[in-house]
Image (cartoon, rainbow, N blue to C red):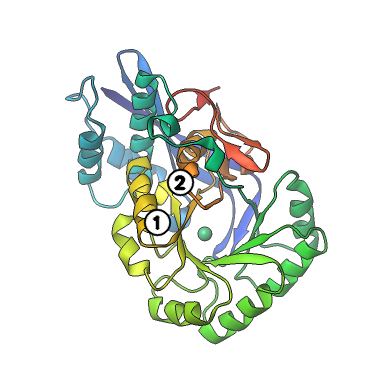
Amino acid sequence: MNIRFYPYTLELKRPFALSAGSRTTTPAMMVEVELEGTVGYGEASMPPYLGETAETAANFLSKIDLTAYSSPVALETMLRYVDGVAPGNNAAKTAVDIALHDWFGKKRGAPLYRLWGLSLSTIPATSMTIGIGTREAVRRSVEDAVGFNVLKVKLGGENDRGMIESVREVTDIPIRVDVNQGWKDRESALRMIEWLSTKGVEFVEQPLPKDRPGDTAWLRARSPLPLIADESVVRLADLPRALGVFDGVNIKLMKSTGLGEAYRMMTAARALGMKVMVGCMTETSCAVSAAAQLSPLADYADLDGALLIRNDPFTGAAFAGGRIMPAEGPGIGATRL
Ligand code: MG
């Protein structure tokens, strides 16, 4: 099997603001694997705060040698090999994982969700993200979110109550809140969550810094709303530490090293009695289509990543009826334009 890769810059439709800062582009690395005339597509999306860059991804991917692998592909063996090439590099590993899964599904002529025995009927509604901004910017974003039945509002900035009030001036649909570790004090976090619970908020994602599990457990014991881990849980090995600290976990391909481990995280989280969310970074329809294949296993979905960029080089999973639905094509169900 051959592998090739090239950098790509995702151009955001709007500057993306959250508690850690604002940006207008996201660096990505596209990966293709090819064997017997079938091409599998994958993608690494690398928001700067996660520490990977086009350089680190190219350096990692240049070490990947798949020439020893031939059909039928031993997918699990290959994923273990990729994971062992170097530590870290989670998004770059994800790009290879997605491409291998895509190739695997294409050779079997079916979308991955069907190969996994999943049903489209259990795909949950997806949320549209509302970034931190002025009252006018928030109102505009909410008015743009046509067809969505739930919003994900970024908090942890200077004016959290104002953000929620701005949304509520426009719509009364359910809100999910993502603080991105932005609250620093557990007492004021609890007071804010108590207020949020009167504003039609479903849950709060990553309210406190990831290195504060004790304070987060304290908060969870008193919080009227469920707490969902994002930054605190990257890979499968992090999951046991979230038990008793969070009510659920936001699983993202770019954190988990790909579909293989994300699938295991979803089943493990459910076995531990935790809620399961499938999320994404700003990504093209390549990685979002891959995540959509897993979404029948989730309680909550946040797969708006491809809707936030204006230079999507793929078509695939599409927004319909408030949900991101996989395309019917084989593998990840994405087509290169
Ligand atoms: Mg988050």
- x, y percent for residue 277: 49, 54
- Taking the image as shown, residue 276 lies to the left or right of residue 323, namely left
Q: Residue at x 70, y 50 (%)?
A: 149
Q: Nearer the viewer, residue 82 or 247?
A: 247
Q: Which residue is mark 1?
A: 270
Vertical arrangement, residue 336 with respect to residue 29, above or below: above
Q: Residue at x 79, y 50 (%)?
A: 143
Residue 131 appears in the figure: yes
First along the sequence among labels 2 and 1? 1
The crowd level at tag 2 (other Cα within 10 Å; few <14, some 14-19, many 20+) is many
Q: Nearer the viewer, residue 284 or 316?
A: 316
Residue 159 appears in the figure: no
- x, y percent for residue 243: 37, 69
Name the kind of residue labelled 2 in the image: Leu
Q: For marks 2 and 1, give the CA distance.
A: 9 Å
- Taking the image as shown, residue 199 lies to the left or right of residue 31, namely right
Residue extending furthest right? 169
Circles 2 and 1: CB distance less than 8 Å? yes
